Image (spheres, rainbow, N blue to C red):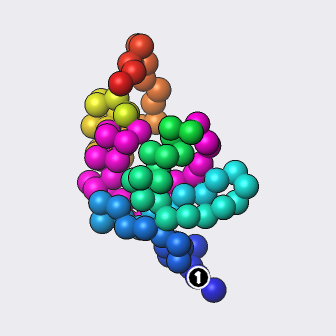
């Protein structure tokens, strides 16, 4: 039995993290950058389970998911109060 915090056997390593993609039908696959981009392009919803995230997560948020730069900056700082920010019509 694996620990709830242990990476899945189907995990890929991206940017030094273990990552698993889980689709709505329960399919689990390696969470590599190509797989993430493929699902995003197809409009397929998915859960990305990251283990060992930290500074290495930021390029994925910025470059793959196209998060606003201020949102990525906020992700670097832990211990902040929850908040909602309006970035206008930001689209990348």
Q: Quadrant of residue 52?
A: bottom left
Q: Residues within 10 Å of mark 1 (few under 14, many from 20)?
A: few
Residue 49 within the segment the image draws in magenta: yes
Given the current orientation, which residue lies at the most extreme right position?
A: 25
Local SS, label 1: loop
Query: Where is residue 15 drawn, in percent x and y?
Result: 30, 60
Residue 33 within the segment the image draws in magenta: no
Query: Where is residue 14 drawn, in percent x and y?
Result: 35, 61
Residue indicated by mark 1: 2
Residue at (73, 55) in percent of width and height: 25
Q: With respect to residue 23, does 90 lie above or below?
A: above
Residue at (66, 61) in percent of width and height: 27
Of 48 and 35, the residue lying toward us:
35
Residue at (70, 60) in percent of width and height: 26
Query: Where is residue 18 drawn, in percent x and y?
Result: 41, 67
Name the image quarter holding the C terminus: top left
Q: Which residues are magenta?
A: 43-65
Q: With respect to residue 48, does 37 lie above or below?
A: above
Of 46 and 42, the residue lying toward us:
42
Q: Is residue 28 visible?
A: yes
Q: With respect to residue 46, does 82 lie above or below?
A: above
Total count of labels: 1
Name the image quarter holding the N terminus: bottom right
Query: Where is residue 44 drawn, in percent x and y?
Result: 61, 42
């Amino acid at each position: 039995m694996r620990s709830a915090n242990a990476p899945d056997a189907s995990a890929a390593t991206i940017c030094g993290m273990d990552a698993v993609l889980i689709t709505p039908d329960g399919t689990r696959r390696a969470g590599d950058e190509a797989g993430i981009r493929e699902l995003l392009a197809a409009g397929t919803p998915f859960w990305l389970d990251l283990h060992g995230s930290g500074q290495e997560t930021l390029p994925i948020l910025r470059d793959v998911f196209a998060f606003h730069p201020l949102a990525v900056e906020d992700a670097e700082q832990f211990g902040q109060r929850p908040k909602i920010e309006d970035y206008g019509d930001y689209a990348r």
